[in-house]
Amino acid sequence: VQLQASGGGLVQAGGSLRLSCVASRRTQFMGWFRRAPGKAREFVGTDKWNDGRTNYKESVKSRFTASRDDAKNTLYLQMNSLKPEDTAVYYCAARRYSGSYYEVNNYDYWGQGTLVTVSS
């Protein structure tokens, strides 16, 4: 599976961005991760194909929304009320099997990342 993420950019605190991730084929298990400067990659959110269940990192739960367009093999991440601490490279990822959606090592395929910078 090939993944292409886009939509990052520079935004002021309180602003919004929408990230997109296009997959080369339909993939049931996809998610968003991020890596902030000097920190490890961490889970952000996911929207599971076919049942619409979503899960989020606690600190983004009320501000970020993951969604899918399965006709376009695309995963989105709508990010509102952005904060400087959301600054990171955001990655979309896909895995072949069910399991812990928040574990980095469970994902088999990764996109190239898109940089989100939130200024204060």
Image (spheres, grey):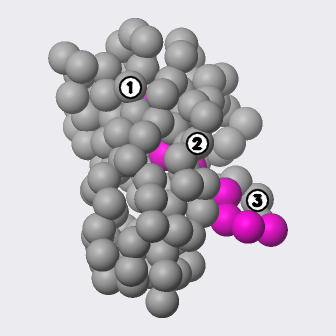
**What predominant SS class does the magenta segment belong to?**
strand
Secondary structure under the numbered disc 2 in the rendered image? loop
Of badges 3 and 2, the one in the foreground is 2
Marks 1/3: CA–CA distance: 24 Å
**Above or below — where is 104 with respect to 12?**
above
Residue at x 36% of width, y 68% of height: 61
Category of crowding for the residue at label 3, using alpha-carbon neighbours closer than 10 angstroms: few (below 14), some (14–19), many (at least 20): few
Q: What are the residue bounds of the magenta stretch?
A: 30-38
Secondary structure under the numbered disc 3 in the rendered image? loop
Residue 20 in which image quadrant? top left
Horizontal side, residue 18 vs residue 97: left or right: left
Marks 3/2: CA–CA distance: 14 Å
Report the amino acid beneath label 3.
Answer: Ala
User: Residue 100's spot in the image, x, y percent?
Assistant: 58, 40
Secondary structure under the numbered disc 1 in the rendered image? strand
Residue at x 44% of width, y 59% of height: 9
Report the amino acid beneath label 1.
Answer: Val
Determine the residue located farthest toward the bottom in the rendered image. 120
Q: Nearer the viewer, residue 7 or 68?
A: 7
Horizontal side, residue 61 vs residue 94: left or right: left
Q: Nearer the viewer, residue 117 or 109?
A: 117
User: Residue 79's spot in the image, x, y percent?
Assistant: 33, 63
Of badges 1 and 3, the one in the foreground is 1
**Above or below — where is 95 with respect to 62?**
above
**Disc 1 marks which residue?**
22
Determine the residue located farthest toward the front in the rendered image. 10
Task: Determine which of the numbered discs, if any, sits on residue 113 in the image.
Answer: 2
Report the amino acid beneath label 2.
Answer: Gly
